[in-house]
Image (cartoon, helix red, strand yellow):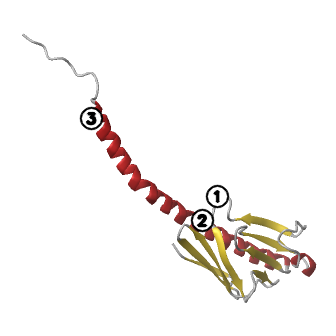
Amino acid sequence: MIMARARRGFTLVELVIVLAVISLVAGMAVPRYASASARYRVKAAARRVVADLELARRLARANSGPVQVRFTAGDKSAYMVVMGDQETLSASINDESSGVVSTVVVTSDPYRVQLKDASFGGSSRVVFSGFGTASDGSVTLLANGWSAKVQLNGQTGVCTVVGP
């Protein structure tokens, strides 16, 4: 009686086939993951802009004084929430004055998006009065082909996100 030998491993051909299948699946999954990741980052950044615009409106109403949100588009995409008198509000975005409530750089983690445009009545700044009203406007965010637009109704303070 002859006993059959037990196989102890895989052949080189089997290993090459498995590696080819894994490479094929990874080749399809990576671009989809990158696209989904960019879409998520744009949505998260848009939600953050909405939250900060609502914060600025609430601060203006609570303190019965102006609160400004300044947007800087381009390579150093950022925005800051500033409250205080007119002198504080007219300072540049690089000025670290005492009226700065928060600064968000959207080109950094976790967002890594670009602020393409911010327009509020012809300005890249929106100023909420002590009554919580402001100019209507919008902010556009981009990442890897995905975009989201945050629209502000200045009279009601309602922000909506149009996009991915």
Q: Do the residues labelled 3 and 1 touch (CB within 8 Å)?
A: no
Label 1 belongs to which residue?
Answer: 110
Q: Is mark 3 on a helix, strand or loop?
A: helix
Q: Quadrant of residue 15?
A: top left
Q: Where residue 108 appears, x then y in whole percent?
A: 68, 60
Three-letter residue code for mark 1:
Pro
Name the kind of residue labelled 2 in the image. Answer: Ala
Q: Residues within 10 Å of mark 2 (few under 14, many from 20)?
A: some
Q: Earlier in the sequence, mark 2 or mark 3?
A: 3
Mark 2 vs mark 1: in front: 1
Residue at 77% across, 80% down: 125
What is the residue that sits farthest to the left in this orientation? 1
Circles 2 and 1 in contact, beta carbons < 8 Å:
yes
Vertical placement of residue 122 versus 27, above or below: below
CB contact under 8 Å: marks 2 and 3:
no
Instruction: Please name the amino acid that badge 3 sits on.
Output: Val
Query: What residue is shown at x 66% (from left), y 57% (from top)?
Result: 109
Residue at x 88% of width, y 79% of height: 90
Q: In which quarter of the image is residue 151?
A: bottom right
Q: Name the residue under label 2.
A: 44
Residue denoted by label 3: 13
Asked if residue 158 is positioned above or below residue 39 in the image, the reply reads below
